[in-house]
Each structure stands twice: as structure tokens, then as C-alpha cells.
Image (cartoon, helix red, strand yellow):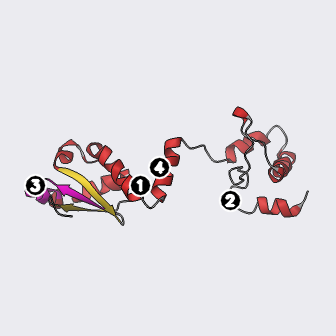
Amino acid sequence: MTHSSNKNSMAGNGWLSRDAYSRYNWRGDKGRFPNASEREREETLADWLGRERSPDVFAALRPKLKSASELVDSVMCKSHQGNVFLLHRLCDEWGLIVGATNAKQTKPIFVRDGMLTIEVANPTWLYILRLQQEKILTDKIAAYTHDKIREIRFMPPGRS
């Protein structure tokens, strides 16, 4: 057992995961073959735990697989166009987030630095939303966006 390769493979968090390695040799539905350092690490753990327990331990410690939509969401939110993607998601689900009545009178128009700008159809609704609904809508939007949006601003139509 060489300690230099083993030391490097165990250095960071998730040292049981094969995700940190770039070599992929797919075996169909069984995943990929481990590389040399992974094989050495897995053999050591299997010797320590016993051959019958090691597959369960590896399965429990590896990260869960993500769906394609979760992967795309995470990449888009990290990109420089994450605000555009977030605004698009808000527009698609606006009626469910703020309710049908509020959605008829409002629409999200801009996201910047954790603030959502919402266009309000008429001055009466603007007054009502600012006085009575701002905290409620802020909490709903923050929950939907996982706190990526922490505050909201209401604007009359035509202003930006």
C-alpha cells in the first residue's frame, strides 16, 4: 500500500466518492471501474469492515444522484445569467407563488443583488401591496427561491 497516493485520495471531504476522479470507464448499469487509488482505498475499507458490509457502507456514504433538472438548475444559477434564469422561473410560477388575485395585478420584471422588482398594474394595488402584502409576499418569494431573493420592490408600470 503506497501512502502517497492513498494520502492524496483521502485528503478532502467525500473521499469515498468516485465523483472526484475524472477517469470514467462505464460498465453499463453497474457504474464504472475504480481507478488504482480508489481500488486501494476500497480494499482497505473492505478489510477493515468485512467484505459483506463494505458495499452497504460505500452506498450510504456516496452522494445521492441528482436528476438532470437539478443539475441544469445548479449550473444555471451559478452562471452569470442566473438572475435571468431565476426571473424566468418566477414568471412561470408567479400565480402559484403570490396567488391568483395578486398575480393578475403584478408581474416580476427584474432581479438584481437579491432584490426582485415587481410591476404593479395600478396605483391602488401598489398602495395595498406596499402597506399590507409586502412582508407576506417577500416571505413567499424568499421561500420559493431558497433565499436568493431577500427583498422586493414595487413599481408602477412603465418605470424601471
Q: Tell me which numbered mark, 4 or 3, is placed earlier along the sequence.
A: 4
Residue 93 is situated, as x and y percent measured from the top left of the image, at 31, 44
State the quadrant of the N terminus: bottom right
Disc on res. 146: 1
First-in-chain label (2 vs 3): 2
Residue bounds of the magenta highlight: 115-129
Mark earlier in primary sequence (1, 3): 3
Point out residue 92 in the picture as x, y percentages from the top left corner.
32, 44
Q: Name the residue under label 3.
A: 122
Task: Give whichever of discs 1 and 4 has the lower sequence position.
Answer: 4
Q: Residue furthest top?
A: 29
The numbered dot on residue 73 is 4
**Magenta span includes 119:** yes
| Residue at x 85%, y 49% (from the top left corner) | 48
- Marks 2 and 3 sit apart, C-alpha to C-alpha, by 53 Å
- Left or right: residue 42 compared with residue 132: right
The answer to whether residue 122 is left or right of residue 35 is left
Tell me the element at label 2.
Answer: loop
Residue that carries the numbered disc 2 in the rendered image: 13
| Residue mark closest to the camera, 1 vs 3 | 3
Q: Do the residues labelled 2 and 1 touch (CB within 8 Å)?
A: no
Q: Residues within 10 Å of mark 3 (few under 14, many from 20)?
A: few
How far apart marks 1 and 4 lie (CA) works out to: 13 Å
Relative vertical location of residue 104 with respect to residue 76 in this rendering, above or below: above
Tell me which corner region of the image, top left, top right, bottom left or bottom right, holds residue 64.
Answer: top right
Count numbered badges in the picture. 4
> Element under label 4?
helix
Three-letter code for the amino acid on which mark 4 is drawn: Asp
Q: Can residue 147 be seen in this view?
A: no
